[in-house]
């Protein structure tokens, strides 16, 4: 079951340049920065209420974020929904005709298990399911 919107991912060319806006114009504090090798990105997280803004900077030109930036430029990349059962969410989405980018969860930022649905099957919005910790069938 979906619990809440966990975060909104925003693709940027440079986190260092974007930080000025988020920290000075908006007054937010960067909670953590991390490199996610599986996605070839550097991330920075800012809490806004119960959700986070995740800035995503590509580490090289083969990163999915680099491809996104080349096609669409900087901006909203994805919306991530927190779930207590990522495998059940994937099964439900697939049964309803959604194209799964990941048929099984991968490790994302913060050690979360994540999986994406293709935007062509989600009305143009790259959709992420995320779950803390273990990736077993019915545990979070």
Image: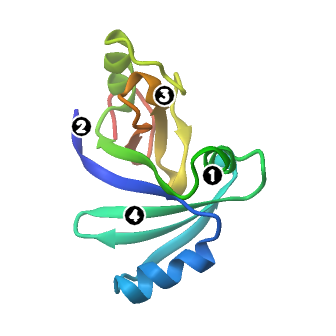
Q: Secondary structure at mark 3?
A: loop
Q: Which residue is mark 2?
A: 2
Q: Which residue is mark 3?
A: 118
Locate residue 136 relative to residue 138 in the image: left or right. right
State how far apart marks 4 and 1 are (Cα).
Answer: 17 Å
Which sits in the foreground, 77 or 31?
77
Which sits in the foreground, 108 or 8?
8
Q: Which residue is mark 4?
A: 53
Q: Secondary structure at mark 4?
A: strand
Q: Residue 114: percent from the left, percent from the top?
A: 47, 40
* Sequence-first tag of 3 and 1: 1
Report crowding for label 2: few under 14, some 14 to 19, many 20 or more residues within 10 A (C-alpha). Answer: some
Q: Is there a contact, CB below 8 Å, between mark 2 and mark 1? A: no
* Sequence-first tag of 2 and 1: 2
Q: Which residue is mark 1?
A: 69
State how far apart marks 4 and 2 are (Cα).
Answer: 18 Å
Q: Residue 6: percent from the left, percent from the top?
A: 32, 52
Q: Residue 133: percent from the left, percent from the top?
A: 43, 47
State how far apart marks 2 and 1 are (Cα).
Answer: 29 Å
Locate residue 134 relative to residue 139 in the image: left or right. right
Question: Nearer the viewer's eye, disc 4 or disc 2?
Answer: 4
Q: Is there a contact, CB below 8 Å, between mark 4 and mark 2? A: no
* Sequence-first tag of 2 and 3: 2
Report crowding for label 3: few under 14, some 14 to 19, many 20 or more residues within 10 A (C-alpha). Answer: some
Looking at the rendered image, the quarter that the N terminus falls into is top left
* Sequence-first tag of 4 and 1: 4
């Amino acid at each position: 079951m979906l619990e809440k919107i966990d975060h909104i991912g925003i693709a940027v060319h440079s986190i260092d340049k974007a930080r000025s806006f988020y920290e000075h114009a908006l007054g937010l504090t960067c909670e953590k920065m991390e490199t996610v090798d599986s996605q070839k990105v550097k991330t920075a997280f800012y809490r806004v209420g119960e959700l986070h803004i995740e800035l995503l900077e590509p580490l090289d030109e083969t990163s999915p974020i680099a491809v996104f930036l080349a096609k669409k430029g900087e901006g909203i990349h994805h919306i991530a929904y927190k779930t207590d059962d990522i495998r059940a969410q994937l099964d439900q989405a697939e049964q309803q005709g959604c194209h799964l980018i990941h048929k099984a969860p991968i490790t994302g930022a913060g050690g979360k298990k994540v999986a994406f649905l293709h935007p062509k099957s989600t009305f143009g919005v790259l959709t992420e399911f995320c779950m803390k910790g273990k990736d077993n069938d019915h545990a979070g």
